[in-house]
Image (cartoon, helix red, strand yellow):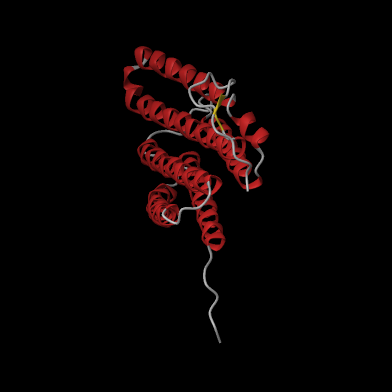
Amino acid sequence: MGYRMITFDDQTRILREKLVTMAALADASVQGAIKALVNRDDGLASTAREEDKAIDELEIEIDDLAVGLLTQGRSANDVRLITVVMKIARNLERVGDEATTISRRAFDLNQDPQLNPEVDIPERANIALKMLREALQAFISGDQARARAVIPRDKEMDALNKQLQRELTQQIMEAPSTTPRCLNLMVISKSLERIADHATNIAEDVVYLYEGRDIRHTGRGKARPVEVYPAR
């Protein structure tokens, strides 16, 4: 019985599958870190840190496979796909890092009284994760319009983070004893804002992949044209 040779297309399919697995792990890691905070569950906080190791390992696997594919000298479309997958993987790895940061701060906060309901961390997490999911679905489906819809939401997350930073700074001034708790919340808010940044980066990469247009550093709404090749 003969063996079928693994083709270039087989390898790119595996590359995509690994990226989707990595995305699911990053999403679950953020969710777990937030649940650890809300439910005051130190076990969940530890789980989020463990998931980060799996995310790191997948990034290495993706990079190794992608570099091997790049050496096969395929078309410009293939090169663009492979490089975008590597960039998305890098952003997902950083999402995992932010989840670890949140879980560590959650562990510290769990030693203090229950989370102040006025600090709606879960809602901020929902916004960031929705952006991430939409950007990744746009990659999977080849829907550049869906990717473009993610990008403006980054400003919303920036504004929410700045608002909370101001409120917590004011609370520190009025009640210095709350400083450790407020600082932990500040870090968590900043991590969620960075997750939104990574989602935005992924969305921009999706636009580049499927439109052949680089919209980074162009005011978000304006696209800087690059050489265009039809998507595969």
Q: Is residue 26 above or below residue 171?
A: below
Q: Is residue 133 visible?
A: yes
Whole-percent x, y for residue 182 in the image: 38, 24
Give the image location of residue 86, x and y in percent.
45, 46
Residue lying at 60% horizontally and 37% vertically, measured from the top left: 130
Total numbered labels placed on residues in the image? 0
In this rendering, the answer to whether 177 lies above or below 145 is above
Q: Residue furthest bottom?
A: 1
- The answer to whether residue 36 shows anywhere in this view is no
**Quadrant in the rendering for residue 222:** top right
Q: Residue 173's image quarter?
A: top left
Say which quarter of the image contains residue 221. top right
Q: 81 and 117: which one is in front?
A: 81
> Which residue is painted at 55% across and 33% down in the image?
227
Residue 191 % position (x, y) = 43, 32
Residue 121: x and y in percent read 51, 31
